[in-house]
Amino acid sequence: MEGSRQKPDASRHSAVGRNQTPVGTRQRTPAFYLLLSAYCLLPTAACLSGCGYTTRPGLSPHLKTVYIKPFVNKIDVTSLSSGHERFPIYRHQMEVDLTRAVTNRYQFTGLLRPARLEKADCRLEGELTDFRRDALRYNTSSQVEEWRLNLVVNLRFVDQTTDTVLWEEGGFMGDMTYFALGARAESESVALDRAITDLARRIVERSVESW
């Protein structure tokens, strides 16, 4: 009878509704979200191009080449000491190795190209003043297990186009730790190579940062 007609199955209609896309709504494709992400990155890109960002931080535009004056060795060998043993291994011509490492670092970064004195826009001068080895860790037998090496220099950076000293810094330091015992042990000579490389990296970074 008409009065006993069954009511529509609400659960069936709600299920169908859940599986249908609302009218006027488009399905978002992966390409849509990719374009949206690119759009959101536009302000960042604009800032990088217009907010003074540069790959030559702190360098004046006219400074493009550098003369690395050979480092001078002013270490007093007789005063060398360490926290545990006197007279750590000392490498002769350490200043030569440092000069070479600094030159190589400039070539690697490309921020300033090494050049001859008469052709360079600026000049880096330095003197090696100290070399230390300090004990950091001992084993149960009171033997030094880990050492720290320190190399100290005085630096001077000159604009040769104006004959102006741009900055000077004394007591500038590079360091490196190494294990003398155990599975990770290495020789002091190898550790010194790493310390020289570390100091060269810091020197080059100092010369191109804001003065």
Image (cartoon, grey):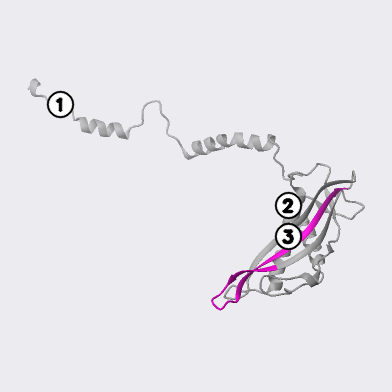
Q: What distance separates the C-alpha of mark 2 from that of mark 3?
A: 10 Å
Label 1 vs 3, first from the N-terminus? 1
Q: Residue furthest right?
A: 118
Q: Is residue 9 left or right of 180 when viewed as pictured? A: left
For the C terminus, which image quadrant? top right
Q: Which residue is mark 1?
A: 7
Q: Which residue is mark 3?
A: 199
Q: What distance separates the C-alpha of mark 1 from that of mark 3?
A: 85 Å
Quadrant of the rendered structure where residue 14 is?
top left
Label 2 Cα neighbours within 10 Å, binned few <14 / some 14-19 / many ≥20: some
Could you tell me which secondary element the residue under label 1 belongs to? Answer: loop
Q: What distance separates the C-alpha of mark 1 from that of mark 2?
A: 80 Å
Could you tell me which secondary element the residue under label 3 belongs to? Answer: helix
Label 1 vs 2, first from the N-terminus? 1
Q: Is residue 122 left or right of 198 when viewed as pictured? A: right
Extent of the magenta region? 133-159
Quadrant of the rendered structure where residue 149 is?
bottom right
Considering the whole magenta stretch, tell me its main secondary structure: strand
Residue 89 drawn in magenta: no
Residue 18 point in image, percent of width and height: 30, 33
Q: Which residue is mark 2?
A: 205
Say which residue appears at 75% left-offset and 66% top-offset.
Answer: 131
